[in-house]
């Protein structure tokens, strides 16, 4: 995967944010990208960007929360490009609100179906074809997949599930030629926050928290780091140094890490 030229890469959640920027970066390396998301209009806009960057792009409108849609996504990629070299499980939705404020418990199922099960469905259908090309599986998780965060309990649960699934799958795939990369971004400027589910299950609650001392990364920088990790076939990508310190500290002083996380995330003044 050192050269992305003529590699076929399927990307879910490709209509905006990290997925969009990663698709364009891959296209600029000569990759053939399969763009999957629910918003077909946005996908065609991304396709045009990819083609201007020098790559080929295929639009496949997909709801990853539906197993049959994930099967059809893989089938369409095979039909047009003949194989799959990498699958990037990037589709995701988030939430905002404390658990005790939740009035619609179905939001937890919605989060799990998109963030976790969507990755499982796509991976299941793509895996035989990835094995045929000794390809790469990429899971775009989050720092919340490593540590709990107040106000995002459902989202953190889905990312913990992703982490466990792909860590286990990596071991199962030893010797198969397929590598597994789990990406844990920090705070990235993407539209996902504006589409967050609130305690009542409705969309568009924005960010009810401000993060003390945070540095928000732009999506293009995040995508460039992911692309480099893909080319190197790394097993995990933590984009900022703080998580490594916190994870090491948690083993010795878990209560301290809880307090740090709580102080970092504070409700915005209204």
Image: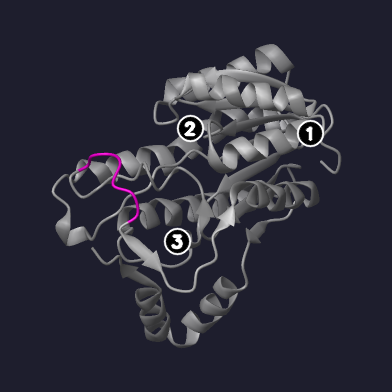
Classify the position of the N terminus by image quarter: top right
Return the residue at label 1.
28
Q: Which of marks 1 and 2 is nearer the N terminus?
A: 1
Is the residue marked by circle 3 packed among few (<14), some (14-19), or many (20+) residues within 10 Å? many
User: What segment is highlighted magenta in the picture?
Assistant: 201-207
The answer to if 203 sits in the magenta stretch is: yes
Q: Nearer the viewer, residue 215 or 87?
A: 215
Say whether residue 3 is left or right of residue 215: right
| Disc with the residue nearer the chain's start (2 vs 3) | 2
User: Quadrant of the image for the C terminus?
Assistant: bottom left
Secondary element under disc 3, as helix, strand or loop, is helix
Residue at numbered disc 2: 121
Q: How far is the residue under mark 2 from the one under mark 3?
A: 22 Å
Counting from the top left corner in percent of width and height, residue 21 is at 64, 39
Front: mark 2 or 3: 3
Q: Residue 52: percent from the left, percent from the top?
A: 75, 24
The answer to whether 132 is drawn above or below residue 163 in the figure is above
Q: In this view, does 269 lie above or below 53?
A: below
Is 191 magenta? The answer is: no
Picture residue at 79% right of the left edge, 33% below the top: 28
Q: Mark 3 points at which residue?
A: 144
Furthest residue in direction front, as rendered: 270
Q: Which residue is drawn at 50% across and 46% down?
A: 190
Q: In this view, does 268 lie to the left or right of 142?
A: left
Q: In terms of image quadrants, where is residue 30?
A: top right
> Left of 108 or right of it: where is 74?
right
User: Regarding mark 2 in the picture, which secondary structure is present there?
Assistant: helix
């Amino acid at each position: 995967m050192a050269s992305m030229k003529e590699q076929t890469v399927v990307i879910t959640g490709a209509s905006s944010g990290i997925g969009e920027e990663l698709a364009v970066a891959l296209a600029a390396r000569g990759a053939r990208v399969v763009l999957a998301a629910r918003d077909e209009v946005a996908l065609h806009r991304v396709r045009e960007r990819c083609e201007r960057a020098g790559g080929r792009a295929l639009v496949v409108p997909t709801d990853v929360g539906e197993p049959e849609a994930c099967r059809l996504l893989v089938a369409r990629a095979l039909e047009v490009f003949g194989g799959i070299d990498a699958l990037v499980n990037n589709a995701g939705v988030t939430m905002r609100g404390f658990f005790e404020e939740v009035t619609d418990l179905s939001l937890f199922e919605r989060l799990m179906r998109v963030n976790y099960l969507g990755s499982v469905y796509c991976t299941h259908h793509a895996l035989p074809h990835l094995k045929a090309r000794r390809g790469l599986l990429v899971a775009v998780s989050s720092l919340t997949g490593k540590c709990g965060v107040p106000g995002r309990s459902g989202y953190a649960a889905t990312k913990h599930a992703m982490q466990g699934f792909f860590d286990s799958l990596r071991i199962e795939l030893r010797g198969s030629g397929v590598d597994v990369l789990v990406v844990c971004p920090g705070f990235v400027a993407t539209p996902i926050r504006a589409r967050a589910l609130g305690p009542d299950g409705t969309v568009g609650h924005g960010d009810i928290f401000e993060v003390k001392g945070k540095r928000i990364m732009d999506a293009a920088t995040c995508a460039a780091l992911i692309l480099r990790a893909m080319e190197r076939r790394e097993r995990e990508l933590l984009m900022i140094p703080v998580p490594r310190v916190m994870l090491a500290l948690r083993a010795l002083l878990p209560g301290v890490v809880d307090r740090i996380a709580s102080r970092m995330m504070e409700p915005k003044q209204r």
